[in-house]
Amino acid sequence: MPEAMITDEQVDMVSAKKVAEELKIGKDYALRLIKRRAKSLSLNPHYGKRNTVSLSREDADRLIADFRAVRPFRSDDTKPTRSGCFYIIQLHPGDLPNRLKIGYTNNIDVRLSDHRTSAPTLRLVKCWPCRRNWEDAAKACITRDGCKVVGGEVFDGDVEAFINRAEAFFAIMPRPQQPIT
């Protein structure tokens, strides 16, 4: 059986698994990241057997640098932060002003950018400093009455009522800037 020829380009390839290890994220998330950012970063992913994906070292470095620029809390020598913000977004303010998306994020700018792919006219209503482990309690408090679940974290409800319930919830919570242990 003849040996397969290995090109110089293949020697310098970085697997999606290796990218995930370098970024300290899951392999599936790394694969989605490569797919989502391939066009904007001019990445040239190589698809191999059994759905393996790899990048040139140059492309991998560009992806890693871009990811770390928008998610600086993921550095090699620090733990990820567990503090961010809780947000309320109007997904379609012109057509459906009471259609609201709520949730937690470490980076509101990245979250808004992600949501703009499906809701380009969205509007950030308000966000509050929040710890990751408060998310479920905040959602339960804010959506306890006067709203209808549309799907997942999307609701139809009175915007002012959502804001008022969120204000009341976060008013009784401690400041999230305190170290989390």
Image (cartoon, rainbow, N blue to C red):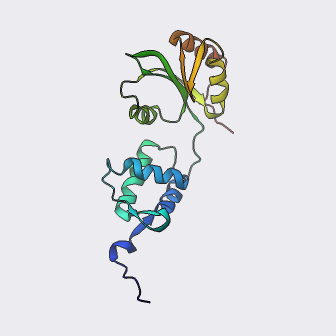
User: Looking at the picture, how far across and down is residue 111, in whole percent?
Assistant: 46, 34
Q: Residue at x 32, y 50 (%)?
A: 41
Using the image, determine if residue 60 lies above or below residue 11.
above
Name the quadrant containing residue 5.
bottom left
Using the image, determine if residue 54 lies above or below residue 145.
below
Using the image, determine if residue 155 lies above or below residue 41.
above
Q: Nearer the viewer, residue 7 or 47?
A: 47
User: Looking at this rendering, what residue extends furthest in the right direction?
Assistant: 181
| 33 on left or right of 128 | left
User: Looking at the picture, how far across and down is residue 82, in whole percent?
Assistant: 60, 38
| 42 on left or right of 173 | left
Residue 106 visible: yes
User: Looking at this rendering, what residue extends furthest in the bottom direction?
Assistant: 1
User: Looking at the picture, how far across and down is residue 136, in whole percent?
Assistant: 65, 29
Q: Nearer the viewer, residue 76 or 8?
A: 8
Quarter containing the C terminus: top right
Using the image, determine if residue 108 lies above or below residue 76.
above
In this rendering, the count of numbered labels is 0
Quarter containing the N terminus: bottom left
Q: Residue at x 56, y 53 (%)?
A: 26
User: Looking at the picture, how far across and down is residue 149, in whole percent?
Assistant: 58, 22
Q: Nearer the viewer, residue 97 or 84?
A: 97
Residue 174 visible: no
| 42 on left or right of 178 | left
